[in-house]
Image (cartoon, rainbow, N blue to C red):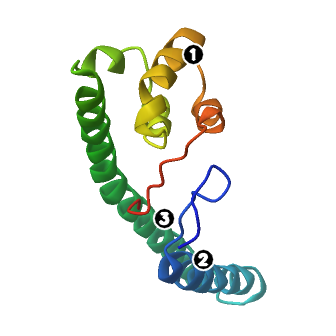
Amino acid sequence: MKKQNVDNHIRFYKPHHFVFYPLTLSLLIIAIYFAFSSNENIVWTFIATSIFLVIWVSYMLRQHYALTLQDRLIFLEIRYRYFVITGNRFEKFEEKLNKSQIFALRFAHDEELVSLTNRAISENLSASAIKKSIQKWKPDHQRV
């Protein structure tokens, strides 16, 4: 498996990203074309609108369910890791950090989690800055 880092940590679900979306987007483009060039533009407008709604709903549901669960798991993971490392609870930092900062911290190895958390709070580092500051990347191959 390829070593994960800040440049390659984005993950794609091939059937969804490279089959379903291109296929439905192609159908949408065809329907829009016929909506403007056909004598039956009302029918094709309805078809185009329906295809667009299928794309939008499928994207929103897939993302919403998976990411909501993933968010909960990341919070629990960070709380657990921080407690194991320091013996202190992480919840007191959650009010000082936003979600994206906490999510970026999950890539930090245990050796730098505490110092990077403190630095993220004191310097108000963005998620991107946190990821770029990580010296020893902790890969997350189980992400959605």
The residues bearing labels 1 and 3 have C-alpha atoms spaced at a distance of: 34 Å
The residues bearing labels 3 and 2 have C-alpha atoms spaced at a distance of: 16 Å
Name the one closer to the observer, 26 or 136. 136
Residue at 71% in and 87% down? 34
Q: Which residue is mark 2?
A: 45
Q: Position of residue 51 (x, y in %)?
A: 52, 77
Circle nearer the viewer, 1 or 3: 1
Residue 62 quadrant: bottom left
Q: First in sequence, mark 1 or 3: give its number.
A: 3
In the rendered structure, the answer to whether residue 29 lies left or right of residue 4 reads right
Dot 3: element? helix
Residue 42 is at least partly visible in this image: no
Q: Position of residue 94 (x, y in %)?
A: 34, 21
Label 1 neighbour load within 10 Å: few <14, some 14-19, many 20+: some
Q: Which residue is mark 1?
A: 124
Q: Which residue is mark 3?
A: 56
